[in-house]
Structure formats: C-alpha cells, structure tokens
Amino acid sequence: MSDVIRLLPDSVANQIAAGEVIQRPSSVIKELVENAVDAGATIIKIILKDAGRTLIQIVDNGCGMSATDARLAFERHSTSKIVKADDLFALSTMGFRGEALASICAVARVELRTMRKEDTMGTCIVIEGSRVESQEPAALTPGSNFMVKNLFFNVPARRKFLKSDQVEMGHILREFERMALVNPSIEFELVHNDVVLHQLLPSTLKQRIVALFGKSMDKQLVPVSTDTSLVGINGFVSRPENARKRGALQYFMVNGRNMRHPYFHKAVLSCYEQLIPAEEQPCYFINLSVDPATIDVNIHPTKSEIKFEEEQAIWKILAAAIKEGLGRFNAVPSIEFDLEDAPEIPVFNPNADATHELKLDTSYDPFKTGRGGATGTRASSISSKDWESLYKEFERNRDEGYAGVKASTLNDFPEDDVVETTVESKVLFDEHESAPDVMQLKNRYILSPSKSGLMVVDQHRAHVRVLYEKYLESAQQNKLSTQRVIFPETVELSASQSQLLESLADTLSGLGFELTCLGGNAWEVNGVPSVMNDVNPQELLLAIVETADDTGKEVADTLLSRLAGAMANVAAIKSGQPLSTQEMEKLLSELLRLATPNYTHDGKLVLNIITTDDIGKMFM
C-alpha cells in the first residue's frame, strides 16, 4: 500500500489560511490598516469600489519596504514583528503571525507599490493567486500603496456568499470605526465609489468619537480614568439617561488593540443596575493599558479575543472606575421628593421671634369635669355632633368610590399580597356592575377567562402581533400613506447607519416615510406612515436601520417583513401602560381574529393558558 500523507502545495495552504483570516472585504481592510499602523504611518487613506469587491486600496506614509522585503512579505509566516517564541509575550505591534498578506494574495490580485524614505527608487510587485507575475522598480513617494482587486476571484463559493454591497459596506464602516477609535492620533480618509465618507484629522479620543458618531455624543459622555499597578483605564461611558434600546456603541481596547470581552462587558453593565431599564444598554469606549506579558492575543487569527491573567482583579477595578466616574459627574440620578401637598417643616431658629396664630381658651380647666366626665367646654362641643348622620355620609362616599373602581384596580395590589373576597368587595359587582370579562395585572398582562381556564396575555407582544399584520398587509398592497409631521425632526446617525438608510430610502418611501438627507450623516424626518400615531421618529428610524442591518437579502418581501416588525415594536403599547376595559377587549378581539395569535413575528410567546386543573393543583 502506497503512502497517503503528503504536503499540501503552498497555494492550497494559503487558501486554507485565507478562510480563517480573510472572511469578507472588511477583513482585508483590517489587516492592511494594521500593517500600516505598525509601519509608523500618520496618514492612512482607504479607497473602495463596490464595497471592496472590485477594489480595496490602502495608501499610507509609513516606513515602506525594500524590493527584497516586498517580495518576501507575501510568503507564509514571514514577518518583521517577532523573531523568537518569547516575543509573543511582549507584543507591541498589531500583526505578528505573517499570514495576512499570504492569505490575501491567495484569493485576489494584489499590486504593491512601496518605497523606503532613504531610497530614491521604489518597487512595484504584482501577485495573483499566490503567483508572482512581475516585479520591477518604480518612481514612488515614501510609504506603501496596496491594491487588492477582484477579491475571491478564484474562490467562487466564497464570493457567492458575500452579502449585498450595502451590508458589506456596513461591515466595512464598523471595522473602520473600530480602527479609527483605537488610533485617534492618525489621520484617516475613507472613500467609496469616489465619495468621501470620512475625513478624520488627528485628535483626542473624545473628538474622534464625536467625529464618527455625531455631535450629540459630546454631551452624553462621562470620562473614566484610573491608574493602578495592574491596569490603567481611560475612556468614556454614556450617562444613564442616554442608554439605548438598540444600537449601543460599545468598544473595548487594550494596548491600542480592539477586542471583545464578554466578562468585562458584564462589569460595565453591573454599574448601571437600577439606573437604566433591563432592555437598555449603555455606550462605552474604554481603553485598558496592561503589561503585554500579562495578556495572550495569540488565540484566534483575527486577534480579537484576548486572555488576561488577572481578569477578576481588572473586573473590580473597571467597575469601581466607572462608578466613580458616574458619581463624580453627577451622572447617577438623585432622589427627587414630591413636594406637592407636602407639609411645611419649620426650621428651628432661636433668635427669631415666635409668631404663630395659636389662640388659647383661657376658660378651659382640665380639672373641672362636666357631664360624661369631660370638661364643660369639651362636653358641649361633643354633644353638638350628630354621629349618626356623619356615619351615613361616610357610607355614601364609600359607595361612590366603589362605583369608580375599574379592572385596573388589580394593579394596586402588591405581588405578594393575598386578595380577600369580603362582603364589601362583593357589593362592587353585585350592586353597581357585573364583573368584567378582562382585567389588567400590573399594567402588563391582560387576564381573561377561557373555556379551559384563565388566559394570560402579554399586552405589548399582543399589540406587536396585531400591528405587524396590519402594517405588512398595508405595505404589500401599497395602502400606506404619508402623514406629514408639524415639526420635522433631525436624526443623527453613524456613517454605517446612514449608508444603510440611504440604501433603504426607496423602500421606506413606499412604506409612507418622507426622509431628507441633510449631509454629514444627518437625516430629517418630514413624514411617517399615517397608521402610526404618537411614535418617536428617531427611535423608529434607529429600529428600522438596526433591523435591516443584517438582512443581507434583496428579497423585497423579507425586507418588508423586517421593517413591518420594527415599526410594530416601536408603535405598540408598552409594558406598564394602563388600559381601560374597552381597550383590553378591543386588543384581545383583534388578536384572536388572527390566524396565528400565539406568537409574535419573531417567535416570542404572546399568550398562555392556565388550565382549571393547574389552578386546582395550587389549592391541594
């Protein structure tokens, strides 16, 4: 039997490595920009065509390469960042594996023009599918100019599974934002299809955040800073009132490198407990400075997962720093007392003259008793009272109060209290009105009897289900008209959100939206669908953008379904909103007329039945 183990050709090995390192156009940009940063560049320009499918060009003013280095840089595991294994534990550069360039040239046509500052002539090298086609000298300016053309031209399956240009551009913009945040001292320019999307000058971290995400961020941020022997922390977190239900901006950086760290993310969230609702998330931009020997970045080819030696200690320091920052800048809301109808509490002042309206009865003698054992003065005042008529008046007022009680009275009982049925509570339904068929519990659930027991309905999800069907049907039949708003509202988006919203403009216009791009990622809402009342345009627009962000499909029905779901989520009644009996009955009627009322469009349970048998078991 012949031997079966053989070495893979370099071209095949490079394509295998490319599958891990190069996943989409944004991965190419990340690797090339990190190389430019390691080369000491102070100006980096990114030029794209067709969201990176046709062209990705990275131009920098870094140190450049010699002709020999330029040729060797595209070989696997060739790098200038490390020499021996111990160097992995003292990394000060973004790259170190020596796989990125080899992976890129394995799945694209690459042209590199580079020259060192001390040289008078540069070099131009062209590589296609890991094969060097040409290398010749060229007159260039110092720095490097990478051009990656026709990405995945030789891997049709990978190119086929790329998303639409809008979705891929969204990924590129988010990657660009991460790189720009971690390198605020570097000038960045991003151009897509000859349109300048970003022009960022060297700045501080806060200025870079405002430049990327809008001027509104300036007043939302609270600085966080601490320096210990274990870790240095600096950055910004958002105020509790600026927490977001969706699209929260959350960035962790360590030693100038972006990272994801769920454990530290929980540390941030713990600082906002009792300050923001459970469904909201704070924004944060936090940079950690640690000894490179105490972290391990050599876990994943993308280098976004990092292990820390002292995770628990850093967790506590991070939480303490954020709490201190929130407290120092009064970001934690103070207790507000209701002063209306509150009694006035006098302040003792021994130097002030006593002024009061108190009148003393000089004829009162506590030792002189009269009829019934009371003094004469007090006895006469008691005898003048008609206690029987006073009691009848009390009963009349009580009955009038019962008549005004509605089903929402259930919301006034604490969760752990036992509601007892008394003679007086029976009068509530026997004398004034029959027991209602629906009741509201805690301003969140609707209770209604059913054939098999008790039906419990989540009022928010029920309304979402009803509105979703209504909006989707109207959109498919083009029945959604526009209702112009009296005061147009301006919404500031990030560059990635603005890019996606621009691609959705025609679809949203068909749904009844009237939007105007004001430039600089700002949009003006002039009209909303007429079926939507009392909806915050900014919240609605953000919900739509986030919902459509990861669609990646150009099927109109799929996009309409997602947009209808986003609109329904924003417009539906919220948990905690009291409803009248008529409103609850109407909502249940509309819900139960649907073909599938049990679940929302995204699979969340709407209603549940507590059977009579289950109720009986509670009393066994």
Image (cartoon, rainbow, N blue to C red):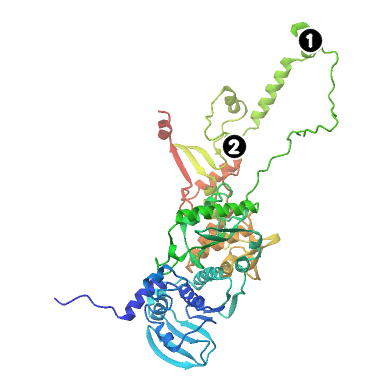
- Label 1 and label 2: CA atoms lie apart by 50 Å
Q: Can you see residue 557?
A: no
Q: Can you see residue 390?
A: yes
In the visual, does 273 lie left or right of 158? Answer: right
Residue at 55% from the left image edge and 43% from the top image edge: 444
Mark 1 vs mark 2, foreground winner is 1
User: Taking 372 as reference, is 409 above or below it?
Assistant: below
Along the viewing direction, whichever of 425 and 100 lies nearer the viewer? 100
Residue at 47% from the left image edge and 72% from the top image edge: 94
Residue lying furthest left: 1
Task: Name the residue beneath numbered marker 1.
Answer: 375
Task: Name the residue beneath numbered marker 2.
Answer: 408
Along the viewing direction, whichever of 83 and 42 lies nearer the viewer? 83
For the C terminus, the quadrant is top left
Along the viewing direction, whichever of 493 and 176 lies nearer the viewer? 176
Q: Amino acid at mark 1?
A: Thr
